Amino acid sequence: MNKRRSGGRRSGGQKPKAAVGRSRTLRLVELAHARSGDKGDTANIGLIALSPRDYPLLVEQVTAARVARHFKGMITGKVERFELPNLNALNFLLHGALDGGGTISLKTDAQGKVFSTALLRMEIEVRK
Amino acid sequence: MEAPYRQVTGGPIDYLMMDYLAEVTMSILQKQKSRDPARGYATDFVTQMERILPTIVDRGIKVTANAGGVNPRACAMAVAEVAGRLGLGGKLTIGVVTGDDLLGRLDGLIARGHGLKNLDTGRPLNDVRDRVLAANAYLGAAPVVEALQRGAQVVITGRVTDTGLTLGPLMHAFGWASDAWDRIAAGTVAGHIIECGAQCSGGNCLKDWDRIPDMANVGYPIVEAQADGTFDIVKHPGTGGRIDVASVTEQLVYEMGDPHEYITPDGVADFTSIQLRQAGKDKVRVSGVKGKPATDKLKVSIAYFYGYKAVGTLVYAWPDALDKAKAADRILRQRITDLGLHFDAIHTEFVGATATHGALGLQDVDEATIPEVQLRVGVRAREEKPVDRFTREIAPLILNGPPSVTGFAGGRPKPEEIVAYWPALIDKRMVEPKVELIQA
């Protein structure tokens, strides 16, 4: 991902949640890249650490529960997570994400192609 | 259209694999075949073969393609005819793989207790039986291997898995046994990496996307395999794109379910065993792949007629672009209610604001600065009538709704037929692949 202009730090009106003390807030886009796709009404997101040393951080912080909260209102089903330490990657299944999926779906993103970058908006805490 | 030609002329290769069948393609091809019994296959393939046949015959390159659709035999006859026209008569053996088409057998299968339950909903196929348009079992590599062993240079199949079209040549070339599970899994992973073409060699790659060179001339992937199941992903010299651990990893996770069990008709691959290493410029070494025995089921892809949909769009400009689009949506929905139109779904999106990332998309955005927003409203119903009526409600909004609206030059949206997808499983013993050879 292009760090030069990714604007990973939040620039809007909200304050970073943990700018004080020993940790700072980063957006996933600064630590990971991703690709997503579909199977029926389920979107999958493969989240891949840009550097292997950041993979444990993804495992620790980007939990299925957090991803479910991140996509609240956008999906109707549960979120499953699988670990692929060999690829420094996590795979998420977002059920009920695609308005029925495939040809039935009325969504622009009926195949879930850009759920990947929506996940990269998530903020996580990084120890300094 | 250029890719196959460049792939066979850009450097030495032994096999060319081509995948033609998206999930809904089969229903379109069944429709064509019902109108003309000589149709029902991917005609693009015949055009592409015309271009590359002299080269592949000259160099002995073998081709595997699921371009046969619902009529692989007719596809093979068309290729044979082209070969004859090119003066290659007698020089080309074409293998034809069939047995995947279950459309004519559905009632018999259901009567014998094969309910073909929907894998997602658990409903029996009888729910939509009278609306089924196509039904095909996914065959694996075995019939492809058989065709190659019997001397076919071009293997044309119906619904064979994308991975089987890559695994078949590897099993044939290296003599891999059908129960050499780790090797079967390795060949399956190779197939998964290259099945979307350049999507593993720089296409759609997010990492450093703006530094990937020469995408107009992107190189398609090539598997350089060894007998032990290790392989490299490479591309022809002088082509664009980029093959690195990032581009290959992105493709590996694409459309992934449970990575421990990537199930194909040929075996079960464990994606958590895959090791990747940059082995040179635009060269990624793939090793360590572990596999497990195949299941006793085949996946069946069924297409059925669902109903109709239509999508209408209008573009609202600054100031208050998003608020105007929202107001127009409220008016449109009020009209739908007042007209008594009933839909299975009405879906509103604000493209340029929340369409793809939902509320997340506006987190950092000052709404007052958004230059334009496209209102995009879709409806879906079993009957055409309400959908058609909906399409007449878009244009009036231009004069009767919020201001600063444009983007309607395309005219009234057209209702579209929806062919829906019904995934199911069937006992492997119910499906018998067949291989025949045709001499050009």
Image (cartoon, coloured by chain):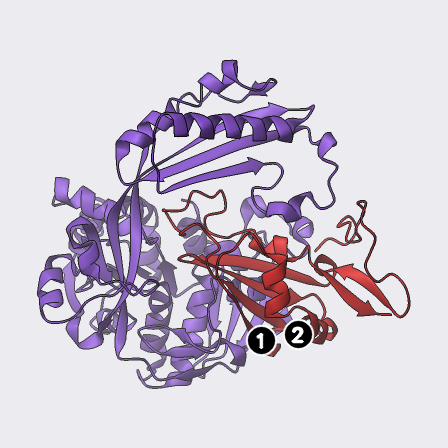
On screen, residue B264 above or below B207: below
Q: Where is residue B84 in the image (x, y as percent from the top left)?
A: 18, 48
Q: Which amino acid does label 2 sit on?
A: Val
Q: Is residue B79 left or right of residue B377?
A: left
Query: Residue B188 in the image: x percent, y percent?
Result: 41, 72
- Looking at marks 1 and 2 on the same chain, the residue that comes earlier in the sequence is marked by 2
* Residue B39 visible in the picture: no
Residue B236 position in % (x across, y down)? 52, 58
Identify the secondary structure beneath mark 2. Answer: helix
- Frontmost residue, B198 versus B322: B322
Q: Is B355 on the left or on the right of A102, as rendered?
A: right
Image colour assigned to chain A: red
Vertical arrangement, residue B270 with respect to residue B13, above or below? below
The residue under the point 34% across, 35% down is B342
The residue pinned by badge 1 equals A83
* Circle number at residue B214: none
Helix or strand or loop: what does disc 1 sit on? strand
State which chain disc 2 sits on: A
Dot 1 amino acid type: Glu
Instruction: Check disc 2 and report the residue beneath it.
Output: A59
Which of the pair B123/B297 is nearer the observer? B123
Residue B132 percent location from the top left of the image: 19, 52
Chain letter, disc 1 residue: A
Mark 1 to mark 2 CA distance (whole Å): 8 Å
- Say which residue appears at 50% left-offset and 25% top-offset: B331
Write down which chain is painted purple: B
